[in-house]
Image (cartoon, helix red, strand yellow):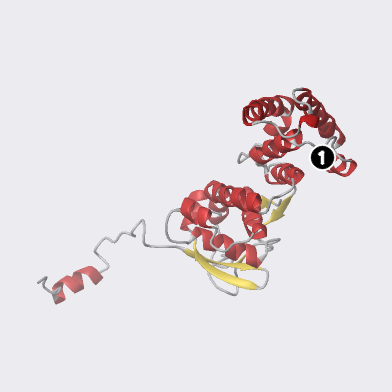
């Protein structure tokens, strides 16, 4: 049986002359955040390690008088963020187990909640959370049987080129021709005209009066459509490709509403 520490050992460990080191994993810095009317005190380690935006904000020099996030009376204010969305983000970050498994299971988060997490992860450059949100939304959107055009519009808004490509391919392969006036207005005239060209080439390969495509024909057409969409919409697909610089030109909104210098982050 291990012996108990002696009084001399205890005195030595408590002595200020003995060098002490903070454990890199379990000496956690916590900060208080105010989101709408709700306070959150959370460890900042994940944010500092995975978000340049938060890392820069948390490393800003502060005096004892101006320090934010230490007490409930002077929290770090996250402006323009909903407390429900921030809470959902924390639920994903501080879950137990692999993040990919969490995304696969969905964990009770709705379509709208995952979209909010995707928006926050884009804004704060949380790439791991972004990937998890896209994985979860892929499954949810398919289960909801989302309209073809909605895939395109969501892909544009949230910078997911795979969704844009998927939506265009589905629009091009459907038997209903042409793109409706409403869809053209949603897509934009230029995109609608490009899509009509692809649709024309698809249906030139097959007579719609024959009914459904056979399996071999369907596979051949699907491959041709993907290549056509990637070629015709190459610039758009490139424009909606996410990078940590994708949000630089979006109007900024402050993390903190205080008068002291604070980092400003772009809002989607």
Q: Which residue is mark 1?
A: 187
Residue at 56 percent across and 66 percent down: it is: 69
* 157 in relation to 144, above or below: above
* 228 in relation to 142, above or below: above
The reply to whether residue 225 is visible in this rendering is yes
Q: Relative to 21, is 166 on the left or the right?
A: right
**Residue most toward the right?**
181
Q: Tell how many labels.
A: 1
| Residue toward you, 180 or 26 | 180
The reply to whether residue 262 is visible in this rendering is no
> Where on the picture, by quarter, is residue 179?
top right
* x and y, in percent, of residue 238 in the image: 68, 31
Residue at 59 percent across and 50 percent down: it is: 139
Q: Relative to 231, is 14 on the left or the right?
A: left
**Residue most toward the front?**
210
> Where on the picture, by quarter, is residue 63?
bottom right
* x and y, in percent, of residue 214 in the image: 66, 31
* x and y, in percent, of residue 143 in the image: 63, 53
> Where on the picture, by quarter, is residue 73?
bottom right
In terms of secondary structure, where does tag 1 sit?
Answer: helix
| Residue toward you, 248 or 155 | 155
Packing grade of label 1 (10 A; few <14, some 14-19, many >=20) is: some
* x and y, in percent, of residue 172 in the image: 75, 33
| Residue toward you, 120 or 77 | 120
* 214 in relation to 244, above or below: above
**Residue most toward the bottom?**
7
């Amino acid at each position: 049986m291990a012996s108990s520490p002696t009084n001399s050992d205890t005195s030595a460990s408590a002595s200020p002359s003995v060098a002490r080191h903070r454990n890199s994993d379990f000496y956690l810095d916590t900060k208080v955040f105010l989101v709408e009317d709700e306070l959150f005190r959370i460890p900042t380690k994940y944010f500092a390690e995975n978000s340049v935006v938060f890392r820069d904000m948390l490393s800003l020099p502060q005096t004892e008088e101006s320090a934010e996030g230490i007490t409930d009376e002077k929290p770090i204010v996250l402006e323009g963020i909903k407390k429900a969305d921030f809470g959902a983000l924390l639920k994903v970050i501080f879950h137990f187990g692999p993040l990919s498994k969490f995304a696969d299971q969905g964990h009770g988060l709705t379509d709208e909640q995952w979209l909010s997490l995707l928006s926050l992860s884009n804004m704060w450059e949380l790439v791991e959370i972004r990937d998890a949100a896209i994985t979860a939304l892929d499954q949810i959107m398919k289960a909801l049987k989302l309209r073809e055009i909605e895939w395109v519009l969501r892909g544009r808004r949230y910078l997911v080129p795979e969704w844009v490509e998927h939506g265009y391919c589905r629009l091009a392969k459907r038997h209903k021709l042409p793109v409706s006036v409403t869809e053209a207005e949603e897509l934009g005239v230029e995109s609608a005209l490009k899509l009509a060209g692809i649709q024309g080439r698809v249906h030139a390969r097959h007579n719609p009066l024959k009914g459904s495509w056979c399996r071999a024909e369907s596979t051949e057409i699907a491959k041709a459509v993907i290549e056509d969409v990637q070629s015709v919409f190459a610039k758009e697909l490139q424009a909606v490709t996410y990078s940590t610089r994708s949000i630089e030109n979006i109007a900024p909104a402050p993390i903190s509403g205080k008068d002291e210098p604070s980092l400003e982050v772009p809002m989607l």
